[in-house]
Amino acid sequence: MPEPRIRPLDLTDDATAADVHRIGLAAYAVEAELIGFDGIPALGESLGQMRAHPLNWVGAVCEDGEVAGFLAWEEHTGGVGIDRLCVAPAWFRRGIASRLLRHALAELFPGRPVTVTTGAANTPAVTLYARAGFTRGRDFSPAPGLTMASFSAGPAPAGPSGA
């Protein structure tokens, strides 16, 4: 089976949006299990709510149109914030997240500051970001029972506030 190709995703397309939503729910269910916290906001998101986010999307897409994984980000004045990086469980451990992240860093926002957070107990994601050259920042707890890890890559954000 050929490797999925990285390409932009159009969430105005109903089938694409439905695939992305399904994959996100499945991937975040696995993360919830890993980190012992089922209050991940994306787990409660409807398809419409997901589509309403002002995000940019790329996916790893097979020749038959199957979406194996995706990365979504938002632009900030001082850089880029990765909002979500999800892989369909059937595609776990096949390098999809690494390929998406490498593509984003090299092709979509080279040389720009990039930030991302993940559950501190999500060992696969923590390892992914560390291997991709991200620096781990402070952990924080946005809700009781949840510890998040923050990561950054690229040059320091511009401006006194880092934003």
Image (tube, grey):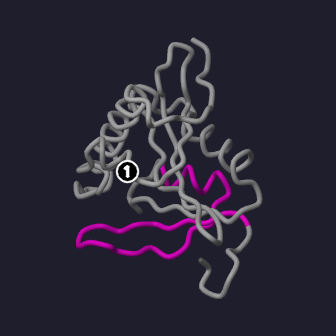
Does 131 sit above or below residue 87?
Answer: below
Image point (75%, 54%), residue name: 110
* Residue in front for this viewpoint, 2 or 58: 58
Which image quarter holds the C terminus? bottom right
Does 141 sit above or below residue 160?
Answer: above
* Residue in front for this viewpoint, 96 or 110: 110
- In the rendered image, residue 109, in percent from the top left (x then y), is placed at 70, 54
Does 103 sit above or below residue 34?
Answer: above
Q: Within 10 angstroms of label 1, few (less than 14), some, or many (20 or more) residues?
A: few
Amino acid type, residue under disc 1 in the picture: Ala
* Residue in front for this viewpoint, 111 or 141: 111
Is residue 50 toward the left or the right of residue 55 in the image?
A: left
- In the rendered image, residue 29, in percent from the top left (x then y), is placed at 28, 43
- In the rendered image, residue 120, in percent from the top left (x then y), is placed at 41, 62
Q: Give the magenta part as a residue range.
A: 125-154
Say whether residue 34 is magenta: no
Is residue 4 toward the left or the right of residue 149 in the image?
A: right
Does 93 sit above or below residue 66?
Answer: below
Name the secondary structure under disc 1: helix
Is residue 69 toward the left or the right of residue 1 in the image?
A: left
Which residue position holds label 1?
Answer: 52
Query: Which residue ends up furthest to the bottom in the rendered image?
Result: 160
Is residue 114 toward the left or the right of residue 127 in the image?
A: right
Q: Dividing the picture into quarters, in which one does residue 21 lie?
A: top left
Which image quarter holds the N terminus? top right
Say whether residue 134 is magenta: yes
Image point (25%, 56%), residue name: 36
Image point (37%, 35%), residue name: 23
